[in-house]
Image (cartoon, grey):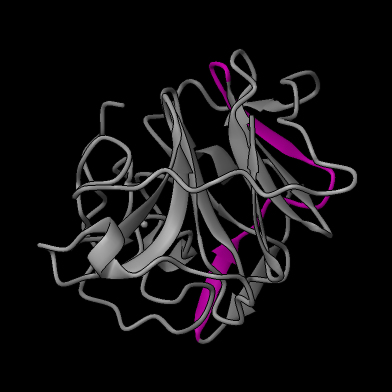
Amino acid sequence: MRLRPVLAVAALLITAGCTTPAPPLPSGGPTSVVSVSPPASSPATPPASPTATAPKVPDTVGALDVTAYEVSMFSSPSGAIWCAVQGDAAWCHFPSDFKGKIPTSKQICPDEMLDVTGIAVGKKVEYFCSGDPTAFPDLKNAGAGLEWFTGTGFPTVKKNGFTLATLPYGKKLADGSFVCLSETSGVTCGDSKTGIGFKMAKAGVTILS
């Protein structure tokens, strides 16, 4: 997965919508990220999580088309989950109150001395490490990553001093075949062509394939 330039943002100590989190990640977030094709530094592909009614990667029908932008970042309406989508990847950071199991840095990025902060999907699904968040939808830093939000009329949410651009529940963003859907149960992102992706929720991550 090809990463794009990362949005330069002063070092942030984020404890809000994200733990210290990023793809294996695609670029498009603040500084200090492990920039590599979906995870930078020896990423590991997480095992699929079996569920009774497993979610699926949403289709792009009815989605807001954001292909005109390099990367599009957003927050869940609660302000807890921060995500981004671009033409060849999508990723989300773990919320600060994440209850799921997170692999260790030693497993994902042993040489980076960074925290495992989220999960991404490109050609496959992988956890990633980062210092600052690579999805940072704060309107005070409007610019790369938030152009899609202008004129949508979508609401913002305030979280730990940040005013975040949100993707309302029931809405989708699509950049090519990559799409993200916001729901009260979490954010689902993936490649609508291959059907691989993930669902990020406070309770944990579900791998879709």
Q: Position of residue 92 (x, y in %)?
A: 51, 53
Q: How many marks?
A: 0
Residue 174 falls within the magenta-colored stretch: yes
Residue 40 falls within the magenta-colored stretch: no
Is 71 located above or below residue 155 in the figure?
above
Q: Position of residue 124 (x, y in %)?
A: 44, 30
The residue at the point 61 percent across, 13 percent down is 193
Is 59 located above or below residue 48 in the figure?
above
Residue 130 can be seen, yes or no: no
The residue at the point 21 percent across, 41 percent down is 36
For this orientation, the residue located farthest to the left is 111
Q: Position of residue 203 (x, y in %)?
A: 71, 70
For this orientation, the residue located farthest to the top is 193
The residue at the point 42 percent across, 24 percent down is 123
Question: Which quadrant: the N terminus?
Answer: top left
For this orientation, the residue located farthest to the right is 53
The residue at the point 28 percent across, 68 percent down is 105
- Quarter occupied by residue 5: top left
- Quarter occupied by residue 54: top right
Question: Which quadrant: the C terminus?
Answer: top right
Q: Magenta span covers which residues?
A: 161-177
